[in-house]
Image (cartoon, rainbow, N blue to C red):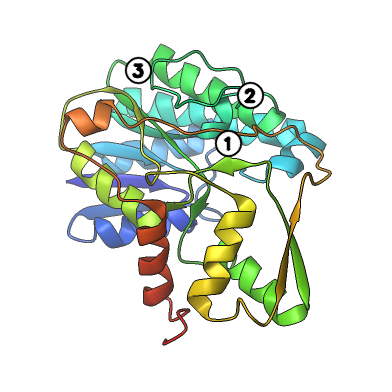
Amino acid sequence: MRIAITGSNGQLGLALRQALAGHDLMHIDLPEHDITDLEGINEAVLHFEPDVILHTAAITDVDGCERDPELAYRVNVLGTRNMAVAAQASDAPMVYISTDYVFDGARQEPYWEYDATQPQSVYARTKWLGEELTRQLLTRFYVVRIAWLYGDGPRNFVRTVLRLAEERDSIQMVTDEVGSPTYALDVAGALSQLIHMPAYGTYHLPNAGVCSRYDWAGEILRLAGVADQVELQPSANYPRAAQVPKYVEMRNFAAAELGITMRPWGEALWDYMARAGLLRDG
């Protein structure tokens, strides 16, 4: 297949490049390609003639989006519009990567793919608008919601926790944010299956299960063998520019019906840390 990947240098983009290495790939990322340039990106995609577009590019700094909403709307909304237009012109289906933050996190039970959304922040609203534009402009699309993504790259939650453990004697992590840590390579594997199925619609593809940020950090420290060397302190809250959902568990119903399931988050975390050489035994 000829596959165009936006955000190809990001955590999910890099994982997709690995999972789809046997295909003909177009890497779309700055500075060579700018998804906010409608004419330029449309021309580049048309020239490539993709069979499918995987649109992962976004401004994902949640608090940064709150401080600079114009940039968030330009990239997450207009950028998605531009990619949908390119998909139209190329007669190619598009995968749009969305987020668990489109839900408000106000209930203590799983959100299904078909539940009403209620975004609470600029970031969440721009990602939800990206979903809506995808649905409005295309007839062949996959809207895929993921959560708490981590993967290869110099910056992610896992490496941040381990860096803080080296720099400090104690670390504070919140207990009132609960979600599903999700390994980028697992998402990439699921997407590599999904794009071969003309089962268009909305999907939830986080790793299975939920935990708090505090519990996630504790497991990272335990696996790295440094849990006894640094004090992990629970915090009820952490002041943020953006309002974030407190409890989001997303039910994988639609993809599971196609045979695409996601393993538990703890198993995926161990795998990532083993691959990255971050486990206690290397």
Residue 9 percent coordinates (x, y): 47, 59
- For the image, the number of numbered tags is 3
The crowd level at tag 1 (other Cα within 10 Å; few <14, some 14-19, many 20+) is some
Disc 2 marks a residue whose amino acid type is: Arg
Q: Which residue is at the front of the view, 35 or 191?
A: 191
Label placed on residue 193: none
Left or right position of 26 against 157: left
The quadrant in which residue 53 appears is top left
Q: Which residue is at the front of the view, 55 or 169?
A: 169
**Gap between marks 3 and 2 measured at Cα:** 20 Å
Q: Name the residue under label 2.
A: 125
First along the sequence among labels 1 and 2: 1
Q: What element carries label 2?
A: helix
Quadrant location, the C terminus: bottom left
Residue drawn where x is 22% and y is 54% of the image: 24
- Residue placed farthest to the front in the image? 228
One can see residue 1 in this view: yes
One can see residue 92 in this view: no
- Of circles 1 and 2, the one toward us is 2
Q: Name the residue under label 1.
A: 36
Residue drawn where x is 26% and y is 26% of the image: 254
In the rendered view, tell whether residue 94 sits above or below residue 209.
above
Q: State yes or no: discs 3 and 2 in contact (Cβ < 8 Å).
A: no
Residue drawn where x is 36% and y is 39% of the image: 205
**Gap between marks 1 and 2 measured at Cα:** 18 Å
Left or right position of 145 against 165: left
In the rendered view, tell whether residue 90 sits above or below residue 57.
above
Residue 230 percent coordinates (x, y): 70, 77
Q: What element carries label 1?
A: loop
Q: Which residue is at the front of the view, 218 or 59?
A: 218
